[in-house]
């Protein structure tokens, strides 16, 4: 879990995992763009909407726009250098993941 500027890890070995770190850095950028607190409000509300939509906690989580962006781009270690401001908006469209 990431709460700017901290990343909380269940496994200390995750700090050596570049993909994991990149995923969390994407969340840090998202949080900064939304001035931190609004990020968490949006995240929570979007999760609730997705939960109603999918009726499945896992599907709801994976379809939150912030998570969709982070998972889609976590392996691209240069993504944050070219990412557009509020890049998560293009991930608002729902999927059946």
Image (cartoon, rainbow, N blue to C red):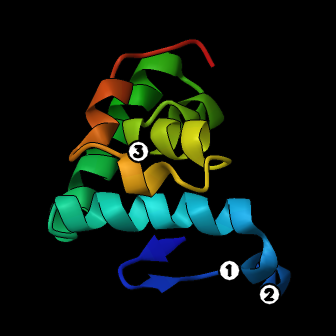
Q: Is residue 11 left or right of residue 90?
A: right
Residue that carries the numbered disc 1 in the rendered image: 9
In this rendering, would 59 be left or right of 87? right
Residue at image coords 24%, 58%: 39
**Residue 3 rendering spot, x and y as whole percentages:** 40, 77
Q: Which residue is mark 2?
A: 12
Q: Quadrant of the N terminus?
A: bottom right
Kindly state the secondary structure of the residue where label 2 is placed: helix
Task: Say left or right for 77 vs 20.
Answer: left
Outermost residue, top side: 96
Q: Is the Cβ of the residue at disc 2 closer than 8 Å to that at disc 1?
A: yes
Q: Is residue 9 left or right of residue 45?
A: right
Alpha carbon distance from label 2 to label 1: 6 Å
**Residue toward you, 50 or 9:** 9
Q: Is residue 90 above or below residue 84?
A: above
Question: Above or below — where is 80 with respect to 50?
Answer: below
Above/below status of 49 relative to 79: above
Given residues 22 and 54, the one toward you in this image is 22
Numbered mark located on residue 37 in the image: none
Residue ID at (84%, 82%): 13
Percent across and percent down for residue 14 are: 78, 76
Q: Secondary structure at mark 3?
A: helix
Figure quadrant of the C terminus: top right
Residue under circle 3? 66
Indicate which disc, 3 or 1, sits on the residue closer to the N terminus: 1
**Residue nearest the observer in this picture, 59 or 13:** 13
Write down the quadrant of residue 94 in the picture.
top left
Look at 60% across and 42% down and name the residue there.
Answer: 71
């Amino acid at each position: 879990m990431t709460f700017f500027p901290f990343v909380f890890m269940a496994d200390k070995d995750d700090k050596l995992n570049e993909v994991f770190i990149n995923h969390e850095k994407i969340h840090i950028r998202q949080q900064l763009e939304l001035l931190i607190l609004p990020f968490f409000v949006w995240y929570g509300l979007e999760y609730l909407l997705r939960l109603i939509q999918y009726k499945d906690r896992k599907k709801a989580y994976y379809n939150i726009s912030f998570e969709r962006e982070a998972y889609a781009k976590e392996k691209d270690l240069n993504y944050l250098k070219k990412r557009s401001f509020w890049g998560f908006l293009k991930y608002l469209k729902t999927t059946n993941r």
